[in-house]
Amino acid sequence: MKGYTISLFAGLLLGTAACNDFGDMNVNPNSALSPNTASLLTGAERTVGAINSQVGPSSFNMTPALYVQQFSDVTYIEDSRYKTINFSYNGLYAGPLVNLQQIIDQNTNESSRGLAAAYGSNGNQAAIARILKAYIFQFITDRWGDVPYSQALKGSANFSPAFDTQQSIYTDLFKEWKAAAAQFDGGKAASGDIILGSNATRWKKFAASLRLLAALRLSKVDPTTGKTEFNAALADGVLASNSDNVSYTFLADANNENPLYTNYTRSNRKDFALSNTFVNYLKKVSDPRLPVFAAPNLKGEYVGAPYAVFPAPGKAQDWSLAGSAISSQTSPAYLMTYAQVLFAQAEAAQLGWTSGNAKSLYEAAIKASMQQWLGSNYTDAAYTTYIAQSDVAFTSANALERIGTQRWIAQFNQGTESWNSWRRTGYPTLTPATNTLNGGTGIPRRLAYPVTETTLNATNYAAVVARQGKDDQYTRVWWDKQ
């Protein structure tokens, strides 16, 4: 259901003013008279952290990392063989998107903006909420394609929203991120922001960088618009160093800890290890990030789990699980990194979208990633040796392949972004699972809609399938063109 039930909750909270024949006799002094927008923002941001971690309900978040073979499942050997076809986005509509829309409404409507200002200036709150709302909608449309957008989040006014085309959604996302960044008003900082601490400058960089990466998604389907939007975003100021990296910080708290820690340590399941595809490539190029990404197995070796092999030829202790930088209780989940932005600029330069030097930007992206992951262990000597290797060195002839492969490495533990990049560019070159469980032969290109759409929104579901194509894992989303 893409209507939002919080409208009923808000109505109950605010409706006390309508029954005023008895003054304040029936008003509960312990009840809030308006939603706490700071709490709504924190709640939404916690979900943003969760969808950028790798392990979630039914492997929802790990699945793209399995598709691009950064990870392999070592217990059930199912999602690396593409067993799950239908995935639900209902929780995103009913959870964080509801919260963010309520923040926007409370800070926009004349009847509520005065009370909402207790949690920060109206402009600052609405700006953050709009940036995150657009971010989540991009996450949804990139996974499923055409989805409810313009008619979503209308509450009881529309419980069966139509599906917007991905093209129209992207057009609006560019506008939203730009307008939201301009809405920061220099007033009281928004409360409840646990991602960027209500730092308007950092939020503006994040919004511009989101536009930059979204523009590059159009490289094959609409390069003219992509080039225009890319350069506009670049001019507005994007992430400029690793100190600008945007991440969600988990806590040393069982209720808000890194999900891989929960899986590995608290639950002692150890369902996922790095795949042999990923580990073997990092070994091939002597990548100094391998000991950070991976933990040695019980023999003290770095060994990837055989990808999509059933039955499993070993146990979890035979393979390299994610390293402590990825899987400790407080390990962060990256929403966006400086290295990502540099790889985007390198590709744009290679495409002729900008006047930048593709080789310099590519090498700067590798350096930024190494500095991000290696920290004090980074050395210029190791970096210089690394980029001089024949399998890493940049040339115009292999530029897009090199950028795509190194982006795949740098975006380890950012499964959805890695899958998005692979679908759009085809790099790195990956071999699909040999014995699939979905009836197909290739790596999935999208997720099928939640089954609830076939019953609760049947008319609009039929229309979108007729327009977009068969509701399976191989109908490509709008920007995913060969």
Image (cartoon, rainbow, N blue to C red):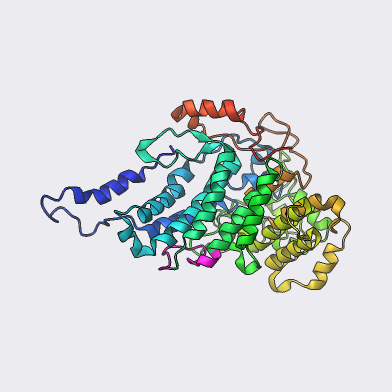
Choose top left, top right, bottom left or bottom right for residue 191. Answer: bottom left
Q: With 460 as the anchor, is 218 left or right in this view?
A: right
Q: Position of residue 456 (x, y in %)?
A: 44, 30
Q: Position of residue 217 (x, y in %)?
A: 66, 46
- Nearest to the observer: residue 206 or residue 413: 206
On-image quarter of the N terminus: top left
- Nearest to the observer: residue 334 or residue 23: 23
Q: How many labels does the image show?
A: 0
Which residue is rendered at x = 42% and y = 42% of the image?
153
Q: Where is residue 426 in the image (x, y as percent from the top left)?
A: 75, 43
Q: What stretch is highlighted in magenta?
A: 187-202
Choose top left, top right, bottom left or bottom right for residue 155. Answer: top left
Which residue is rendered at x = 57% and y = 60% of the image?
206
Q: With 480 as the anchor, is 250 left or right in this view?
A: left
Residue 16 appears in the rendering: yes
Image height of 5 relative to 405, above or below: above
